[in-house]
Image (cartoon, rainbow, N blue to C red):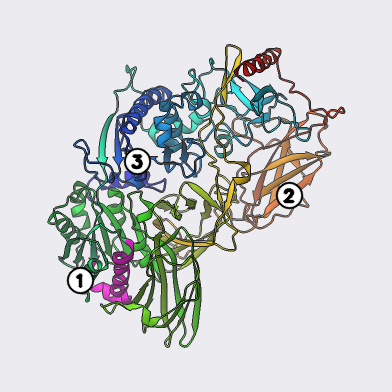
């Protein structure tokens, strides 16, 4: 291994833990490589970039103080769309692109609100995907509702970079504390305020005390917490960074372990500062001494350019085996015809022991341009494997066409080993090109992943079936313009017997339909083909255009826009052979966001027996799609496949229920080497729905108490209750999640039990009479798969300590509780006979699961059950912790509102 490569490998693997290739790194306390990308749909506005700069400059100083002098923002790249006017200060991007952005500036999908948020769905300490700000948030005065924009940025940066969570909870804004007082869900409890209901009828508004719910004893749903404008509390940024006194994260000393928020749930009641301190950023950085403020950040303005791609394809002797050359050409032709975007510049290089430039860059304007390149795909395989020769020829093909390698893309495919591959690593780094790698078969060079990692490219492993086509289909546009991106609707392989028919259906929904192609491939002989559109129009094999290179494929381009509805296909073969069906399309309209699916693993490398998580995000624009059937297929190098149904149930590996992020643990390691991920998403019989609410949004402050008066902010635009969800029509998507590598696994795939049941994260408890009713989602025998052996339930009258230690609590008799299959809803009712139960009694309950191997899960989230006996008068009681001062404030507020109205 070349000098420095081990360090490079460590850094690139570390940076790729979050599923998308962020370029951010910390250098001498300063963050470098931060990308803020403006979506192509955002109109040009001369005020937008200055506002971004102002926000980041404010944020850098605030971050420096909040991190106790450890980190700040040193340089930022702002990526503007290709549609904006050219300016002399705009530079050409190197490896910066929209899909690598840490912050995106884009319109909300709906008119409701401009709440900033971070797309974050990993475990505690895992980095998020991106921060989303809207242009309206950056260009209007939001000071009273969100606080200074720089402070909001730091709040979201903590989500993105350090994997901490919100300390408020919009679904449970109040809770009963261990001291039997009603508290606002917050951190720290030193933040003071009052709790009121603000009601309006016509032009008359009244602010009154919160009443207690007669069933639960908690405050009524409309009750809100209004903070004092001026506080003495310095924490916490993950609760209300807008308060002028708040300049710190909650620490072990002031963290509120009782609050029912996501930070406590996901991080086992650890404080945000404790999680941040243990991050790689802080482990490798010391505070800057003698520095009161960091230097201001510098900004680079970059403008997206047209896409430049060069295919660098292996035609060495080993490519003649197992139909690899033919399969490569099938996939490459599909990529040229159906995947790469119009107006892209595309070249072709082939290599064996040496390399040949088959095509310099050609601008793709129509199908004939694609055919010019496809006509030069290799017809014979021979010779050795010189990957560096191929890369160098790829760079020449780009530069000889008047383009810079910086920001260009290389798609490198090989099935062979090459001992000299490391000799061109330095040239690759200098080029500024992004290298996407496709490892074809188990013998492909192990250094391919290094090329992808060091350049921010995607990495794929192709085994059998449709995997090679799927890999090429996964290398789509990175410009942020979704309307340009090709979408896969179908990708199936069939081993058919002679004389048998196979049938399938493909739903085409109303968000797609342009550039729709049906492609059939075969290994022996072209099958009989019958395709019908939703109106029963029939297409047969004669309508499908055979390729001109004898690569055993035929395609049908649907004229115009494909009919919405269910398409059906039937294939009949006269010989036993392998057939594949691939369907691709694009968005129906540039103004309508298509339904999308994106998949990835929690990390790109795994050392057995580490846990890996499969993630699939299903959305339309920025809105999550709920209720879809999402299935992951993971294939090992030996060809063995594991199929997992992914869940969005808020249990096991899933962080939040119903957020459109479908997850599952993966533990079925079948030896070392490369594994590929492919995800199928289907919605049938109108069971899927679009959620119109953004769950993890920034806190919209309802108002403040100033000088004894409640000053309310304008109400936040809300989605009407009757329109929180919308039915989604039937649809289908297929997406490649790339590849990952495994080491340290037993070679035969057999291993002893090393994984316990997964932690229960959604335990809930409530009193029903003298009994307590528990509900939770069943874990499995192995994390979230199978059936646990038994449950251990404990209860206490005391809230958990900072470590959530519940081992000394009272055991509950669970002899009649038999665990269900993982993912099932569990219910259990018991009478807490060891405690005296009266009005106001609080019990804290937690659960663990054991498996047959004697392994025990982590302790669950701690559920609280409060015994509440309504007053006999039937009138809701006022909160016991309302002070006379607060009553005075309410009286003044009523007078204040009367004057306003």
Residue that badge 2 annotates:
827
Q: Position of residue 333 (x, y in %)?
A: 29, 69
- Mark 3 Cα shell of 10 Å, populated few (<14), some (14-19), many (≥20): some
Q: Which of marks 2 and 1 is nearer the N terminus?
A: 1
Give whichever of 319, 502 is nearer the camera.
502
Q: Earlier in the sequence, mark 3 or mark 2?
A: 3
**Magenta segment range?**
314-339
Q: How far apart are the alpha carbons under marks 1 and 3?
A: 41 Å
Q: Can residue 637 be seen in this view?
A: no
Q: Earlier in the sequence, mark 1 or mark 3?
A: 3
**Dominant secondary structure (helix, strand or loop) of the stretch shown in magenta:** helix
Residue that badge 3 annotates:
43
Residue that badge 1 annotates:
376
Residue contact between numbered discs 1 and 3, judged by CB atoms under 8 Å: no
Residue contact between numbered discs 2 and 1, judged by CB atoms under 8 Å: no
Using the image, determine if residue 755 lies above or below residue 858.
Answer: below
């Amino acid at each position: 291994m070349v000098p420095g490569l081990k360090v490079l490998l460590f850094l690139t693997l570390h940076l790729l833990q979050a599923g998308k290739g962020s370029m951010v790194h910390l250098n001498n306390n300063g963050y470098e490589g931060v990308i803020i990308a403006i979506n192509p749909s955002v109109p040009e506005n001369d005020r937008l970039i200055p506002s971004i700069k102002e926000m980041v400059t404010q944020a850098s100083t605030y971050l420096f103080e909040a991190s106790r002098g450890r980190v700040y923002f040193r340089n930022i790249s702002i990526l503007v769309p290709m549609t904006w006017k050219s300016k002399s200060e705009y530079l050409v991007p190197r490896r910066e692109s929209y899909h690598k952005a840490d912050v995106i500036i884009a319109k909300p999908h709906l008119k409701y609100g401009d709440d900033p948020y971070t797309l974050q769905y990993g475990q505690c300490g895992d980095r998020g995907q991106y921060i989303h700000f809207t242009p309206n948030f950056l260009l209007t005065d939001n000071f009273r509702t969100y606080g200074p924009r720089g402070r909001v940025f730091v709040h979201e940066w903590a989500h993105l970079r350090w994997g901490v969570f919100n300390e408020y909870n919009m679904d449970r804004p109040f809770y009963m504390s261990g001291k039997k007082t009603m508290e606002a869900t917050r951190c720290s409890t030193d933040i003071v305020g009052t709790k009121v209901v603000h009601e309006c009828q016509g032009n008359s508004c009244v602010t009154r005390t919160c009443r207690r719910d007669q069933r639960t004893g908690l405050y009524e749903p409309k009750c809100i917490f209004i903070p004092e404008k001026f506080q003495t509390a310095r924490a916490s940024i993950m609760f209300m960074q807008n308060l002028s006194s708040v300049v710190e994260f909650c620490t072990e000393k002031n963290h509120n372990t009782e609050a029912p928020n996501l930070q406590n749930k996901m991080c086992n009641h650890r404080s945000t500062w404790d999680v941040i301190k243990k991050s790689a950023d802080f482990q490798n950085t010391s505070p800057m001494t003698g520095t009161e403020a960091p230097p201001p950040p510098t900004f680079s303005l970059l403008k997206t350019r047209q896409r430049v791609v060069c295919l660098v394809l292996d035609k060495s002797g080993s490519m003649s085996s197992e139909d690899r050359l033919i399969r490569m050409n099938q996939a490459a032709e599909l990529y040229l015809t159906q995947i790469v975007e119009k107006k892209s510049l595309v070249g072709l290089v082939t290599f064996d022991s040496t390399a040949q430039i088959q095509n310099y860059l050609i601008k793709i304007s129509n199908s004939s341009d694609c055919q010019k390149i496809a006509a030069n795909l290799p017809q014979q395989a021979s010779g050795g494997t010189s990957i560096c020769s191929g890369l160098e020829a790829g760079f020449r093909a780009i530069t000889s066409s008047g383009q810079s390698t910086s920001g260009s893309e290389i798609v490198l495919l090989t099935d062979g080993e090459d001992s000299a591959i490391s000799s061109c690593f330095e040239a690759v780094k200098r080029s500024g090109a992004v290298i996407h790698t496709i490892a074809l078969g188990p013998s492909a060079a192990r250094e391919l992943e290094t090329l992808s990692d060091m350049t921010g490219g995607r990495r794929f492993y192709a085994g059998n079936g449709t995997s090679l086509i799927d890999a090429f289909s996964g290398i789509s546009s990175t410009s942020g313009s979704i309307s340009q991106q090709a979408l896969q609707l179908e990708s199936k392989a069939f081993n058919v017997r002679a004389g048998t028919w196979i049938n399938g259906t493909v739903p085409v929904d109303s968000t797609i339909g342009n550039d729709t192609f049906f492609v059939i491939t075969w290994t022996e002989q072209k099958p009989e083909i019958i395709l019908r559109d939703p109106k029963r129009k029939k297409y047969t094999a004669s309508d499908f255009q055979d390729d001109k290179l004898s690569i055993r494929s035929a395609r049908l381009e649907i004229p115009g826009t494909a009919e919405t509805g269910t398409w059906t296909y039937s294939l009949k073969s006269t010989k036993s052979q392998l057939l594949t069906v691939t369907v691709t399309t694009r968005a129906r309209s540039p103004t309508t966001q298509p339904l999308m699916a994106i998949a990835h693993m929690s990390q790109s490398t795994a050392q057995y027996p580490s846990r890996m998580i499969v993630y699939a995000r299903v959305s339309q624009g920025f809105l999550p799609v709920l209720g879809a059937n999402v299935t992951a297929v993971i294939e090992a190098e030996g060809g063995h496949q594991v199929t997992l149904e992914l869940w969005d149930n808020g249990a096991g590996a899933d962080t939040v229920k119903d957020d459109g992020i479908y997850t599952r643990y993966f533990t079925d390691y079948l030896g070392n080497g490369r594994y590929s991920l492919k995800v199928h998403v289907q919605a049938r019989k109108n069971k899927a729905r679009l959620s119109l609410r953004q769950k993890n949004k920034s806190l919209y402050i309802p108002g403040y108490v100033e000088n004894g008066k409640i000053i309310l902010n304008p109400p936040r635009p809300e989605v009407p209750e009757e329109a929180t969800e919308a039915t989604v029509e039937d649809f289908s998507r297929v997406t490649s999640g790339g590849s990952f590598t495994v080491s340290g696994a037993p070679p035969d795939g057999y291993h002893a039990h090393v994984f316990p049941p997964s932690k229960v994260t959604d335990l809930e408890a409530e009193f029903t009479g003298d009994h307590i009713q528990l509900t939770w989602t069943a874990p499995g025998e192995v994390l979230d798969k199978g059936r646990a052996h038994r449950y251990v339930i404990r209860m206490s009258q005391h809230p958990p300590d900072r470590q959530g230690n519940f081992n000394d609590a009272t055991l509950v008799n669970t002899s009649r509780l038999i665990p269900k299959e993982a993912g099932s809803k569990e219910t259990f009712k018991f009478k807490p006979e060891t405690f005296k139960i009266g009005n106001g009694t609080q019990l804290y309950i937690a659960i663990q699961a054991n498996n047959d191997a004697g392994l025990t899960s982590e302790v669950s989230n701690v559920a609280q059950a409060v015994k509440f006996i309504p007053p006999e008068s039937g009138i809701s009681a006022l909160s016991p912790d309302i002070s006379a001062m607060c009553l005075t404030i309410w009286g003044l507020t009523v007078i204040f509102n009367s004057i306003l109205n």
